[in-house]
Image: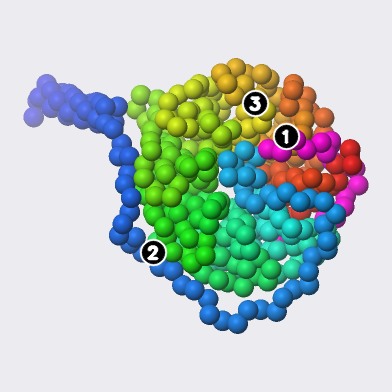
């Protein structure tokens, strides 16, 4: 074969490859992704009820002195707002109330109600604790990792696991009441409203589960991995996916209200680890590539878009007309919720992977380098630092901060109390 012929054949082969790649790129740019559908087959889903005798009732927790308002799920409320702007705790006091080493990582913060804390440890243990003293009341183990916060639903605690289970325990003594199994890992933190618990699976299905029986009320298949936690906004439940989707569905029927897909660039779809948070009318979320989105909750239409310019995983906190987002380059930003104007940026040494938390006039965040900070919500100035912490900083009640510090729970009174 002559050199000229070899050159021609090589050029033709290269041209075929280029044209094939161009065709694929055009197909990606022009194709519309499926909006999904209700799953009526429920393949791989089963529910079992517990019939064994209840374990002995543990000693009652100490009577809480205040803290009448619960923190029932990740985010503190069904909106996943991650905010208690009305609290006036001030900075955490210097003296600890109590601290307990949990012996395992807490990727997500605890939940709280009626003097009890509930926390999931990474390797599958759920622990109920006396919030006044830190005494352990009961523990239960899941069949997989539990990288989530448990959800309080009346007298029940709903726990999701990477082992493919969603389980209801009796809050008072940890008795297992029912368990749903699916062919999917559940990384999503559940939320319960009106007797229904909502949780997402990594097979792309969003589950609405009867809190009383564990039976699915409806299941919607979006077709893309769900690692985020659903938010309930009025009559809607909303979710984000790793395949670039943000969508809202009727809370009682699962009927699709709207679904949108977002692109990182001309050739690639974006992906979301952050959950959607809400102020009651708008949804706020951040994509892994750093796009900060504000969408109309009723229609999904754009309200505004900004960019962190860095990888972003943490769910935004929303409070008093501001949205707070951290990124993996150590920056925390505050945006005006109405129009997306950047109000301030604060830079710290480290990477902010987890969500922000607003308590009164302070916004808290933790770094992967195990520091926890508080900045002023008005201007971003750092006013408090604790050389401990990782992932989500924690929660707050009327009297106290409960910080989840990389395997240690640490409890502080507010300095103004």
Residue at the (78%, 50%) spot, across then down? 67
Viewed as shown, does residue 62 lie left or right of 248? Answer: right
Rounded to the nearest angstrom, the CA distance separating label 3 from label 1 is 11 Å
User: Crowdedness of circle 2 by 10 Å Cα count: few (<14), some, many (20+)?
Assistant: some
Q: Classify mark 1: helix, strand or loop.
A: loop
Q: Circle 1 sits on which residue?
A: 85
Residue at the (56%, 65%) spot, across then down? 168
Residue 231 can be seen in this image: yes
User: Are the residues at dot 1 and dot 2 in contact (C-beta closer than 8 Å)?
Assistant: no
Q: Quadrant of residue 388?
A: top right
> Can you tell which of label 1 and label 2 is closer to the viewer?
1
Closer to the camera in the image, 391 or 217: 217
User: Crowdedness of circle 3 by 10 Å Cα count: few (<14), some, many (20+)?
Assistant: many
Residue 180 image offset from top left, x and y in percent: 46, 65
Point out the image quarter for the C terminus. top right
Region rendered in magenta = 83-103
Q: Classify mark 2: helix, strand or loop.
A: loop
Tag of residue 322: 3
Viewed as shown, does residue 22 lie left or right of 213? Answer: left
Rounded to the nearest angstrom, the CA distance separating label 1 from label 2 is 40 Å
User: Sequence order check: which comes first, mark 2 or mark 3?
Assistant: 2
| Image: 162 above or below 261 | below
Residue 380 image offset from top left, x and y in percent: 74, 24
Rounded to the nearest angstrom, the CA distance separating label 2 from label 3 is 40 Å
């Amino acid at each position: 074969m002559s050199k000229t012929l070899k050159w021609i054949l090589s050029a033709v082969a290269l041209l075929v490859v280029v044209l094939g790649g161009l065709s694929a790129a055009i197909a990606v740019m022009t194709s519309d992704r499926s909006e999904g559908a209700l799953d009526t087959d429920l393949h791989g889903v089963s529910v079992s009820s517990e019939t064994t005798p209840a374990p002995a009732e543990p000693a009652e927790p100490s009577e809480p002195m205040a803290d009448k308002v619960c923190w029932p799920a990740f985010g503190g409320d069904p909106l996943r707002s991650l905010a208690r702007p009305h609290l006036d705790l001030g900075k955490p006091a210097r003296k600890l109330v109590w601290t307990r080493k949990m012996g395992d990582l807490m990727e997500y913060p605890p939940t709280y109600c009626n003097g009890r804390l509930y926390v999931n440890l990474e390797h599958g243990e759920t622990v109920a604790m006396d919030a006044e003293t830190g005494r352990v009341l009961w523990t239960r183990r899941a069949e997989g990792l539990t990288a989530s916060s448990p959800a309080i639903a009346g007298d029940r605690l709903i726990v999701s696991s990477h082992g493919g289970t969603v389980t209801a325990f009796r809050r008072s003594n940890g008795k297992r009441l029912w368990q749903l199994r699916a062919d999917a890992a559940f990384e999503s933190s559940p939320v319960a409203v009106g007797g229904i618990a909502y949780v997402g699976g990594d097979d792309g299905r969003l589950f609405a589960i009867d809190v009383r029986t564990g039976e699915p009320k409806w299941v919607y298949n979006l077709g893309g991995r769900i690692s985020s936690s659903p938010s309930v906004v009025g009559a809607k439940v909303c979710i984000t996916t790793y395949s670039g989707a943000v969508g809202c569905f009727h809370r009682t029927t699962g009927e699709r209200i709207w679904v949108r897909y977002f692109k990182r660039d001309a050739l690639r779809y974006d992906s979301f680890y952050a959950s959607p948070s809400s102020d009651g009318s708008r949804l706020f979320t951040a994509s892994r590539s750093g796009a900060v989105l504000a969408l109309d909750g009723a229609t999904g239409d754009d309200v505004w878009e900004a960019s962190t310019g860095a990888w972003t995983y943490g769910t935004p906190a929303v409070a008093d007309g501001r949205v707070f987002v951290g990124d993996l380059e150590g920056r925390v930003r505050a945006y005006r919720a109405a129009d997306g104007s950047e109000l301030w940026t604060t830079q710290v040494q480290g990477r902010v992977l987890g969500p922000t938390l607003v308590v009164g006039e302070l916004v808290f965040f933790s770094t992967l380098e195990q520091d926890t900070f508080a900045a002023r919500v008005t201007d971003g100035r750092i006013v408090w630092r604790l050389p401990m912490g990782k992932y989500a900083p924690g929660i707050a009640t009327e009297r106290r901060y409960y910080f989840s510090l990389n395997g240690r729970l640490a409890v502080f009174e507010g300095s103004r109390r």
